[in-house]
Image (cartoon, rainbow, N blue to C red):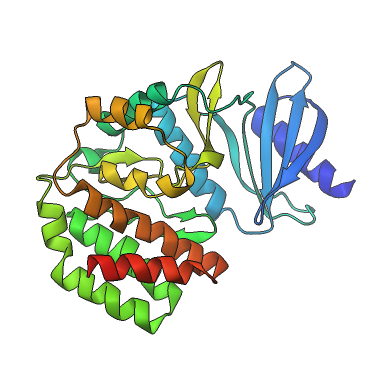
Amino acid sequence: ARARDALESWLERELACEVVDVVPAGSSQWATFATATCADGRRAFAKTSARDAEMFLGEAAGLRALRATNAFVVPEVYGVGAAPEGARGWRSAIAMEYLNFGGRGDQGEFGNALATMHAATPSHEEARNGKFGFERNNTIGETPQPNQWTESWLEFWRDKRLMHMIRLARDPTLTQLAEKVVDKRLADMFSACGEIKPSLLHGDLWSGNIGTVGRKPSVFDPAVYYGHHEADFGMSWCAGFTPAFYEAYHAKIPKAPGFEERAKMYKLYHYLNHYVMFGGGYQRECLSILKELA
């Protein structure tokens, strides 16, 4: 009861309302979920974690940036931060608007919304000035994702994404192959598509983070940063995008030369992350892609 009381008092402070009900709503590997109801009828979705507030602060900043593009229905963040003194079993929390998520919805509409988001004028000045990164570091799954603002996409992708993940994987064979790809292939892969401008990316676009609200496309649980728009297809092996999705997307943002090869590299980042988090068979996928690219 004490843990729930601490969460209730935290929610009341962040939502500025009297909380009349908090109901458990499941958990993931690194967070516990609940829904809260206020006396005024408002509902919130809350997540708590035994980790410090960094993960949720990154998520909150990402959700706010996604909302600013007006491309998708995105939950409004009500509050985020460290647990109050006396909280037991959790050290940080985030509370956001409770949304009734429906199924996948129209794939063409989703493709159109994603292209709208990628083409939107960045809400961050650094990205408007051509830099890649984000206002703070965040996480992809539970893996730290560094987002320091960087002048060139090649440099950002090499240092903050691909080789960052390779270092975390601690696998000599993968390291050797990745270094070869970076030295011999990366510059050509990026120059093939012309100038790369910073687009706001969801960063973890798979079927579990996609839905609809009132039949409108919706996204949540992001790992946001500004990067090459094609990088948002990196989780497509887990997303179930249909031809209608790609058709609508590419009607707004045409497919650039070298798309297929870069798509393999953008998937590699996420396969590496799965290898870092879960080990096992993902090493084979990483090895296979690196050999193709090298």
Left or right placement of residue 293 versus residue 31 in this view: left
Which sits in the foreground, 38 or 118?
118
The residue at 70%/20% (across/down) is 42
In the rendering, at what x and y percent does residue 23 appear?
81, 35
Residue located farthest toward the bottom when viewing the structure as drawn:
172
Quarter of the image with the C terminus is bottom left
In the rendering, at what x and y percent does residue 54 appear?
53, 54
Res. 253 image quadrant: top left
Left or right placement of residue 255 versus residue 143 in this view: left
Left or right placement of residue 7 versus residue 136 in this view: right
Residue 71 appearing in the image: no
The residue at 17%/55% (across/down) is 152
In the rendering, at what x and y percent does residue 228 appear?
25, 46
Residue 281 appearing in the image: yes
Which sits in the foreground, 180 or 41?
180
Q: As displayed, is residue 79 above or below residue 18?
A: below
Q: As displayed, is residue 35 above or below residue 88?
A: above
Left or right placement of residue 92 versus residue 1 in this view: left
The residue at 68%/38% (across/down) is 46
Res. 287 image quadrant: bottom left
The residue at 76%/25% (across/down) is 37
In the rendering, at what x and y percent does residue 229 appear?
27, 41
